[in-house]
Image (cartoon, helix red, strand yellow):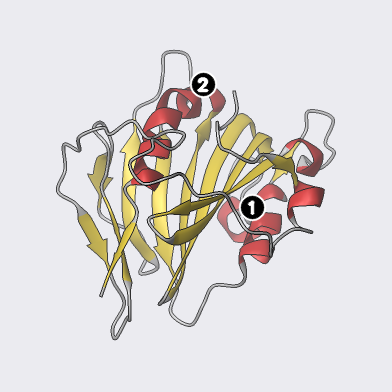
Amino acid sequence: MHLRYPMIVPLAGALMVAGCTEKTPAPGQATPGDLRIESAHPSAVASSPGAARTLRFSAPEGWVAEAPSSPNRQAQYSLARVPGDPEDAEAVVYHFEGGGGTPRANVQRWIGQFRKPDGSPAADTAEIANRTIHGISVTVVDVSGSYTGSMMAMQGSDGPKPGFRMLGAIAETGDGLWFVKLTGPAGTVAKWQPSFEAFLDSFATAP
């Protein structure tokens, strides 16, 4: 199951068209994933000291807010697993003082954390979409496979997690890049995909 966005391209092609102009829906026109889910939680406003524009977002119903486990995590949510999946999914919003790299570099790094069943890179099966949401340029990534995570995250773990999927987004704002990652077993991520799309549609900036 893949994200339903206006432009889906393989990784190799997406990384070559970074400067292309994206199609923006007309005012009032529903965008893919625009489910208008009313949040059971108050809107979150994550900011950094002296930020020119902060990113606003609303957690959809069913996203259980948790205390962020690191300073760079601006928001963190647990998403309940579907029957048969080994664990819940996790959605995290990151913002790094001083940058956090380019969208292209982060897309490559995220996709590089997944492998096909035969152990080969999952880059040629990953999908990327470019959107404009309330004036914010957003790159969206969908990748599945055996999840290895970062080298640091995998230290002391039982190894790669097969059958995982990640929906990721990178929003470009006046105070830098904001990163969203929804990661978990593929079935559970598929269940929460519509609310992930609604989460992205809630993006807005504030002075």
Nearer to me, 201 or 177: 201
Q: Quadrant of residue 178?
A: bottom left
Q: What is the residue that sits farthest to the front in this orientation? A: 26
The image quadrant where one finds the C terminus is bottom left
Q: Amino acid at mark 1?
A: Trp
Label 2 crowd (10 A; few <14 / some 14-19 / many >=20): some
Question: Quarter of the image containing the N terminus?
Answer: top right
Task: Count residues near mark 1 (Cα–Cα under 10 Å), then give few for <14, some for 14-19, many for 20+.
Answer: many
Check disc 2 and report its element: helix, strand or loop: helix
In the foreground, 127 or 109:
127
* Upstream in sequence: badge 1 or badge 2: 1
Q: How many marks?
A: 2
SS at badge 1:
helix
CA gap, disc 1 to disc 2?
A: 19 Å
Residue at (71, 57) in percent of width and height: 108
Q: Give, as a three-letter code, the residue at label 2.
A: Gly
Residue at 78 percent across and 28 percent down: it is 117
Residue bearing the label numbered 2: 187
Q: Is residue 27 visible?
A: yes
Relative to 81, is 4 on the left or the right? right
The residue tagged 1 is 110
Is 28 positioned to the left or the right of 139 in the image? Answer: left
State the residue lying farthest toward the top. Answer: 83
Give the residue drawn at x 28%, y 83%. 49
The residue most toward the bottom is 50
From this view, report whether residue 154 is shown above or below residue 173: above
